[in-house]
Image (spheres, rainbow, N blue to C red):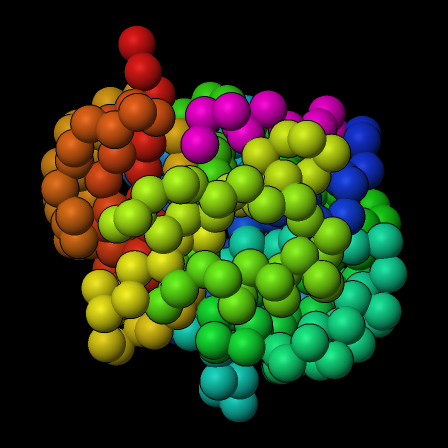
Amino acid sequence: MTEARESAGPHARRTPGTPCWVSLMVHGLATTEEFYGELFGWEFRPGPQQLGPYVRALLDGHEVAGIGHLPPDRRLPVAWTPYLASDDVDHTAEMVRLCGGTVAVGPLDAAEAGRMAIASDPAGAVFGIWQASALLGTALSGVPGTPAWNELLTFETESVSKFYETVFGYAEEPVVSADFDYVTLHIEGRPVAGIHGIGHGLPRDRGPHWLTYFEVADADGTLRQVVDLGGRVVRPAHDSEHGRVATVADPEGAVFSVVQGPR
């Protein structure tokens, strides 16, 4: 996880397949802004409105994420969704369909920012596709309040990893273990995301889904703050090889993880 925190600079176009943005669609935009503003120190400014009201979250003046109002006619989950870079979103969307996935939204232009689509893999996990124009992606990384890693939680890795490999050109590095089903996805020799097969450990109400990790300075303190702000703890903080990690949900139920890097 920590190895992939190095992101391209704000003026560099992301290599296709690289997670380049995270976005959240919610019912209550104002209350969600308040929650994440307090939790991560984000400020907000208006973004493209193609799918309705949408704001970009800024940290120290740098764009790090997006939050939009969920249109009543769109059947999308209240969840953090990673966007994977593409040089041609229309071609990538067609590849998604050819490989057994579904394209739910788009491709469509997001004003001058770029061109986008929202899709799901054959197991049902939702992700975005982003062809950058004015917005190249998350402009800051490696500090508290920024995305640190994206991980797909699914039934098993073998079949779904082939989907992502074919669509986005990833190289795979599986973990060799009899009881741990995990594949790290690489672009140009660099780890960019993970796929974790957890079988019946998947929440029944969610199914396969992508999970975004955000960097924090103090994981235990962040959990207390999440609860104080109306969220809840899904998985308490625990130590891992990547640092201290916990999983939480915001007041609308959007689940995300936080990671405090090793000291």
Q: Residue at x 74, y 34 (%)?
A: 188
Relative horizontal placement of residue 185, taking residue 37 as reference (left or right): right
Residue 109, image quadrant:
bottom right
Which residue is drawn at the image coordinates 80% and 31% (left, top)? 12
- The answer to whether any part of residue 92 appears in the image is yes
Q: Residue 134 in magenta? A: no
**Residue 58 appears left or right of 33:** right
Identify the residue at horizontal 78%, vertical 66% (top origin).
92
- Residue 222: x and y, percent? 22, 33
Judged left or right of residue 179, residue 60 is right
Question: Which of 74/162 is in front?
Answer: 162
Residue at 69%, 76% (x, y): give it: 99
Q: Nearer the viewer, residue 79 or 231?
A: 79
Question: Measured along the vertical axis of the image, is residue 205 above or below residue 254?
Answer: below
Q: In which quarter of the image is the C terminus?
A: top left
Q: In the rendered image, which quarter contains the N terminus?
A: top left
Q: In the image, which residues are magenta? A: 1-10
Relative to 178, residue 153 above or below:
below
Q: Position of residue 95 (x, y in %)?
A: 77, 72
Check the image and name the residue furthest to the top.
263
| Main secondary-structure element of the magenta-colored stretch | loop
Q: Which of 190 and 181 is in front in this view?
A: 181
Question: Image quadrant of residue 187?
Answer: top right
Q: Position of residue 70 (x, y in %)?
A: 49, 74
Question: Where is residue 159 shown, x and y percent of the image?
Answer: 52, 68
Please tell me which residue lies in front, 206 or 106: 206
Q: How many marks?
A: 0
Residue 112 appears in the picture as rendered: no
Position of residue 250 relative to residue 62, above or below, is: below
